[in-house]
Amino acid sequence: MTALADFGIAFGRVAFVMFFVLNVAAILGWVERKQSAIMQDRIGANRASIFGLRAMGLFHPLADTLKMLTKEDFLPARADRLLFVLAPFVSVLFSLVAFASIPFGDTLRVGDRVIPLQAITLNVGVLYIFAMLSLGVYGVMMAGWSSANNYALLGGQRAAALMISAEIAIGASIMGVVMWYGSLNLQDIARAQGDLVFGWIPKWGILTQPLAFILFVTAGIAATKRIPFDMPEGESEIIGYFVEYSGMKFGMFLMTDMVETTVLAGLCTSLFLGGWQVPYLLPDGFHFPWGTVVALGSLTVSLLQVGSFVTKVAVMIFVLMLIRWTLPRFRYDQAMRLGWLGLFPLSILNIVLTGAVLLAWGGRT
Amino acid sequence: MKVAQRFYLREVVSGLVLTAGHFFRNMGKHIARSLGRKDARGAVTIQYPEERRPLSPRLRSLHRLVRREDGSPRCVACMMCETVCPARCIYIVAEEHPNPEIEKMPERFDIDLGKCVFCGFCVEACPEDAIRMDTGILEFSSYSRRGMIYTKEMLLALEPAGHDGVPRSPVPIPADRTV
């Protein structure tokens, strides 16, 4: 009976994360259209309707998916069949599983059972996410190479070069956070961000590591190949690594983009925006700095935490979209220079500064 | 470039502030509109089929043939419009008018709207003020070239647009279209 319950709980944790990521990714197409429209004094796509119900264009992602599913699934004559078919699956798989170790809440107590609100509890969660995001390069490379198209190959190489140069900067910029909170476990990092500085400021990563936050967001956008770093795909004019793809395989590359944006937002949230922390909320209720205490039940606290996490992810996605619709595209050599001569040295500098501060204040050795 | 500009950051932030300002201002107007404030417009979009821009009274739209009081065309088949037409899209066959005071009238008056360039020369050339381009009808389409040829009967049936520029007669539907 307990084995069955354990299995059910584990299944529920994974199912929640998958449900969250897939739905957010699906709705991101709508968010992107509508947000860009409102930023540019437009209305945005609103014509898709079911029985005359338009729902502010919410059915457009559905219509897009239907269109992609019913389109011809074209296979180029000289393509490497296995790799060509495998590439979009590899891309989307690794971006989907990356979300697994991001905590969306503290622990939930049901009876005597303590459930961690996280799909898998890993003590090296940060490394796991980097491993999964880096493996995404393989999907891109496979797509570029197996298409038997020189443009696709060039696009794949550019994408791979960009992703690798950005991921080094990501890894180095996050080291500051890892040093500061002294853990590779995302749950520990999120928990440590609940501490208060001077008794009233939550010790979120964005306050303790502001430089790392900027570097991480920049490198993260580059690693997910979104505007202003979208020169490997450049959906509007450049030919990218998925020229030869059509139908749902192409749709899977688009979905990879959306899922990666969600993962990036989730990672930003748990590393820099306090994860699931609600300010002044402790496991037994609110403890405001002026002394008021509002006691809350365990379930309410967990719901608040999950809600806080979802809200922060939504805000972070908004910011990422804002950046996407504001900045013009970097040239390839500019992006490379920014990655290797800008982000990378600055993130090393951040590590040195963090180390110096930690050493000077003698908090940890 | 100055050092501050080389770091992009300030410029990026000022750009983001600009676009975010647009977003929140427009979002506020959209919300106000959905709460009943009809004068708040968050976008400059005109939602075309439901909402139309007012047309200028001088706009050259679909042609119509002006009728006499007895309903026969005012046209006397003088071929002026057919001659002046740069696109050669007008085809007229003349016949006797039953009234002996009027010399001729068109038996056929076809305009191939697939060729027409909407220059308005036919209107200017007409000595009888028999053809006008004031119906306000802009949407006419067809799946075939043949369906774009509008005959005398179709052109005679059209009414001028109202003062607000809204067409008063329905768009003639070509034979190859059901809707």
Image: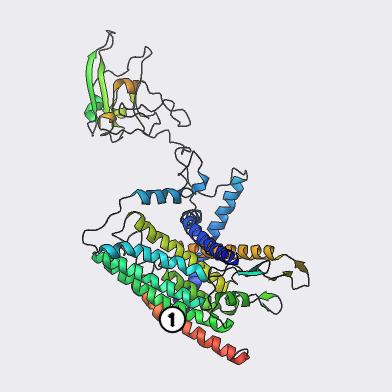
The spot of residue B111 in percent (x, y) is 27, 27
- What residue is pinned by disc 1? A344
Disc 1 residue type (three-letter): Phe
Position of residue A50 in the picture relative to residue B120 (left or right): right
Quadrant the N terminus of chain A occupies: bottom right
* Image point (39%, 80%), residue name: A340
Q: Which of A244/A98 is in front?
A: A98
The subunit letter for the residue under badge 1 reads: A
Position of residue A152 in the picture relative to residue A353 (left or right): left
Q: Which of the colour schemes (rainbow, by chain, secondary structure, one colour) is used?
A: rainbow
Residue B145 position by quadrant = top left
Q: How dense is the environment of label 1, judged by Cα within 10 Å: few (below 14), some, or many (20 and up)?
A: many
Task: Find the residue positioned furthest to the front.
Answer: A1
Tell me, yes or no, if residue B111 can be seen here.
yes
Quadrant the C terminus of chain A occupies: bottom right
The spot of residue A289 in percent (x, y) is 74, 73
The spot of residue A129 in percent (x, y) is 47, 73
**Callout 1 secondary element:** helix
* Image point (24%, 66%), residue name: A150
Position of residue A244 in the picture relative to residue A171 (left or right): left
Q: Which of B163/B137 is in front?
A: B137
| Numbered label tally | 1
The spot of residue A200 in percent (x, y) is 70, 75
Q: Which of A5/A313 is in front?
A: A5
* In the depicted structure, whether residue A131 falls above or below residue B78: below
Tell me, yes or no, if residue A227 can be seen here.
no
* Image point (56%, 81%), residue name: A183
* In the depicted structure, whether residue A75 falls above or below residue B128: below
Q: Which of A54/A132 is in front?
A: A132
* In the depicted structure, whether residue A356 falls above or below residue B99: below
